Image (cartoon, grey):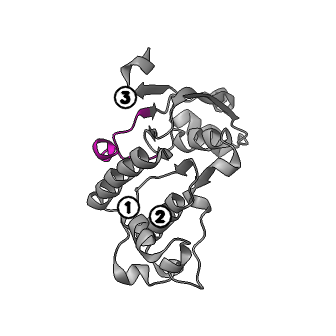
Amino acid sequence: MAEYTITKSFTNQTAITDKVAAVCRMFGLAVAKLRQKRTHSCRLEINSGDIVYITGPSGCGKSVLLAELEKSIPAQERINLSQIKLPADKTVIDCFETGPLASLRLLGTAGLNDCFCVLNQPCNLSEGQQYRFRLAMALASGRKFVFADEFCSGLDRITAASVSWRLRQFADKTGTTFILASSHRDTLLDLSPEVIVTKDFSGTTEVVYKNKRRNV
């Protein structure tokens, strides 16, 4: 088990124009409130093979926590879906170094198993298909940690549930640790994350562990 302590602070540097001051008055907000430092922080205990799910409303700081946690992991041990490129010069199946059957299994785990998708170029896929391609590439990378912001947010919810369930099986089988962030909570049953991090607009962070002994 590894322990991670994350702290990131921001100070609003917005210029206080007449319009900004007027809007503050309309909302009953003191101008000085804009200058207050906002801090995002939490302490996490993570085991190999854990799924960590960061959730909360849009704009609450989920991406901040995910990015700071990513920095805590050595570069050679992690991969982020957002950094995976979409080739235009080869098909999806040719992007994998494994044999056809193993490659199709990885694509199936990511929910991308349509023949025409597999034989298309990644850059020509739909946005949802591109997301699943990136997920499959992350699984194929063999990295110990996979980071994904807006996890399955652009997928229909049935597909999101299916991908979540398969990801749970992959984590259990390979010991890969997934750090995911999304405002959606309908995938929690299928993901069955070991760690749920809930953020709110006030800056409060609540961490709940599936293993109650880690909640103490």
Q: Real-space Cα distance between discs 2 and 1?
A: 7 Å
Q: Earlier in the sequence, mark 2 or mark 1?
A: 1
SS at badge 1: helix
Q: Earlier in the sequence, mark 2 or mark 3?
A: 2
| Residue stretch in magenta | 181-196
**Residue 8, image x and y in percent?**
66, 33
Task: Determine which residue is flagged by label 2.
Answer: 136
Q: Is residue 182 magenta?
A: yes
SS at badge 2: helix
In depth, the one of 57 and 177 nearer the eye is 177
Tell me the number on the disc at residue 109: 1
Quarter-of-image position of residue 163: bottom left
Q: Residue flagged by tag 2: what amino acid is it?
A: Ala
Q: Residue flagged by tag 3: what amino acid is it?
A: Lys
Q: Is residue 1 magenta?
A: no
**Residue 64, image x and y in percent?**
59, 41
- Seen at 56% across and 72% down, the residue is 97
- Seen at 64% across and 48% down, the residue is 77
Task: Determine which residue is flagged by label 3.
Answer: 210
Instruction: From the viewer's perspective, tell me whether residue 107 is left or right of residue 66.
Output: left
**In the rendered image, is residue 163 in sight?**
yes
Quarter-of-image position of residue 105: bottom left
- Mark 2 and mark 1 residues within 8 Å of each other at the beta carbon: yes
**In the rendered image, is residue 92 in sight?**
no
SS at badge 3: loop
Q: Real-space Cα distance between discs 2 and 3?
A: 26 Å
